[in-house]
Amino acid sequence: MNDIHPRILLVRFSSLGDLVLLTALVDGIADVFPAHELHLATKGQYRELFDSNQHVAKIHALPSDARFGDLIKLRSELAAERFDIIIDAHNVIRSKFLYRTLSARRKVQLGKDQVRKLSLIRAGKDLYEETVPMKDRYLGLIAKLGAGIPDVPTRLDPPPEAEAVADALFDESGLTGRRVVALAPGARWSTKRWPSRGFADITSSMSDSGLGVLVIGTRSEQEICRITAHTEDSLDVCGRLSLMETAAVLKRASVLVTNDSAPLHIAEAVGTPVVALFGPTVRQFGYFPLNENSVVLEKDLDCRPCSRNGARQCHIENRDCLDTIDSSEVLEAVRQVLEATGETK
C-alpha cells in the first residue's frame, strides 16, 4: 500500500501494565522492520509511555471515556494512513473492530488464553505446557509475520523533564545517594493488595536499617500510601507524579516491593528489580517479573488461582494467599535483592 514509506499499525488500548510490556514489541518491530513507520493506537491516558519512544512515528489516541462515535472517528483517522501491516495486540471488541474493518496486506492478532485460564481457575487443571511471559506472547506476533523473534526487554526511557522532577524530589527529601526501597502498596483490585499493616511494618524496619523509603501510587491510593509512609525517611509521592515521572523515581530506587500491579512492570522496564507479592494470580498468566534479580513471594494454596486479574472477591472468605505472607519474608527478600545487586553496603 505504501511502497515508499510502508507503515505498521500496532493496536493495544489497555491496561497500564500491558502497555509497559508492549514496549518490548515496539522495539522488536523496529529491529525486524527497520524500514517501516510504526503507528500506535492506544488510550490517551497511556500515550505518555510512548511519546518519547524514537520507534513510534505517530500515536493515535482513543479517549479514556470513548464511545462508539470516538471509535468510528479513530477508524477514519487510521484508514487515511493506509497501513501495510496491522497488529492487534489486544483482541477485544474495539481492537477487533479496527482489525476487521481496516485494510492491510498482512494482519496478525494476539491469541486469547481464556480456556487455559478458566480451566486452572475453575477446575484446578493446568493445561499450560509451558509458561510464556506476556512480553514474549507479544513478541510472538512478529513470528506470525514470518520473521524471527528478537530478544528484547521491556524498556521505558523517561524524558529529561521527568528525570529532573525525580532528581528534585530525591534532593529535597535527602534520598539522593542513599539506598532507597520503593513501595507500591496499591493495586486496582483489593484482592491483590498485601495488607497495609505489612507495608507499614517493613517501612519501620527499613528506616531503622538506614534505608530510604519511597512510596508510590495513584491519587485513589493516597490513603493506603499514607498508612505506609509514616517515618521520617519515607517519601510519599502518591498521586503527585505522571507515568514517566513515576518511572524516573523508580529508576533511582534499588528495589521495589509491589503487589501484582503495573508498578512491577514499570520498575523492571527502567532496570529496577522487584519483590513481588502474588495472591489470586499465578505465573502461568504471564505477568511474573522478568528481571533475573527479582523475587516473587507467594503461597502454595489449593485455592490459587481464583481469578484472572484479581477482580473476583475471595470465594472462601479469607485472604490467606496474601495475608499469610509475613513481613519478615518480605524483608528477607529485599535483603536478597540488595545483595544480588551489590547494594547491601
Image (spheres, rainbow, N blue to C red):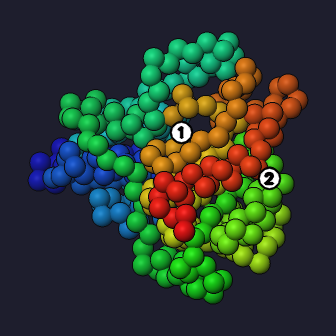
Quadrant for residue 146, please give it: top left
Disc 2 to disc 1, C-alpha distance: 23 Å
Residue of label 1: 287
Q: Amino acid at mark 2?
A: Gly
Q: Amino acid at mark 1?
A: Tyr
Q: Quadrant of residue 242?
A: bottom right
Residue receiving disc 2: 198
Which residue reaches farthest right?
317
Vertical position of residue 320 compared to residue 164: above or below: above
Kindly check if marks 2 and 1 are in contact, taking CB atoms under 8 A apart as contact: no
Q: Residues within 10 Å of mark 2 (few under 14, many from 20)?
A: some
Q: Residue 338 in the image: x percent, y percent?
A: 54, 58
Which quadrant holds the C terminus? bottom right
Total residue callouts: 2
* Left or right position of 5 against 75: left
> In the picture shown, does residue 140 fall above or below 187?
above
The residue nearer to you, when weighing 48 against 319, is 319
**Does 73 sit left or right of 114 as displayed?**
left
Helix, strand or loop for disc 1: loop
| Residue 115: % across, % down | 56, 17
- Residue placed at 59% from the left, 41% from the top? 296
